[in-house]
Image (cartoon, rainbow, N blue to C red):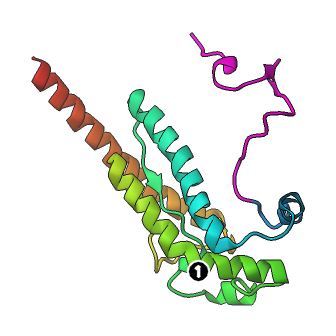
Amino acid sequence: MRASTRSILPDVDDGRLSQDFRPTFGTPDLLSAGEAIQERGGKVEVRKEFPRLVAYTQLWTGAIIDLCKRFRIPLAIGEDVTFFEKAGPSERDIEFGLGVGRSAPQERQFKIHRAFVKTYGNARVKQANLFGVPMTGPGHGNSITYVDEFHYDAPGVQALADYFVAGLGQAMSQQSAQAASRSTNSG
């Protein structure tokens, strides 16, 4: 039996959310930054807002982990790596100017990313450890390929998939071991 949307979302009318319920889907990107700044009445102080981003991320990640564990769905958390965590730019990266801000907002975005990436990554690792979920990905110093600073190209996606397959394999092994332990303890 499928759970009703009404049980988890207030003011739902035929699958549409009322104007009073406006969920947050994530941080603004460059295309929506102007609107976000206008809504907030100016730019936010990043150092003050960063802990809220981490809390938001941990909230939804934790909810997903909890649901997967409840329904015994193997799960691995992917490392959030970008062009900036590569060992160094390739000739192609240099040719296309990856890592070089083309506008003031993009330069600000890159500066903020560099300032907080280590702390953000450490928070994700801590959460994975807390929930006992494998963390998988190429790590810092990788050579994954990108189409821009934050999005992988086709070979980069394939390389990441290889990491995720290994991480899911680890999660499935953990799940099998837990199931075997439960059956041994119950019998």
Vertical side of 126 occupied by 147: above or below = below
Residue 126 left/right relative to 49: left
Amino acid bearing label 1: Ala
Residue 135 left/right relative to 37: left
Residue 10 position by quadrant = top right
Vertical side of 9 occupied by 177: above or below = below
Q: Magenta segment: does it hold 23? A: yes
Residue 60 pos. (x, y %): 56, 45
User: Which residue occupies 60% across, 58% down?
Assistant: 52
* Magenta: main secondary structure: loop
Q: Give neighbour class at mark 1: few <14, some 14-19, many 20+ (Cα, 10 Å).
A: few
Vertical side of 89 occupied by 162: above or below = above
Q: Magenta segment: does it hold 125? A: no
Residue 43 pos. (x, y %): 80, 71
User: Which residue occupies 39% across, 47% down?
Assistant: 168
Residue position marked by numbered label 1 in the rendering: 115
Q: Is residue 170 visible?
A: yes
Q: Quadrant of the N terminus?
A: top right
How many marks on residues?
A: 1
Vertical side of 173 occupied by 32: above or below = below
Q: Nearer the viewer, residue 28 or 141?
A: 28
**Which residues, given as a range, are shown in magenta?**
1-27
Q: Residue furthest top?
A: 1
Residue 29 left/right relative to 142: right
The kind of secondary structure element at disc 1 is helix
Residue 9 pos. (x, y %): 69, 26
Q: Is residue 146 visible?
A: no
Q: Nearer the viewer, residue 80 or 61?
A: 61
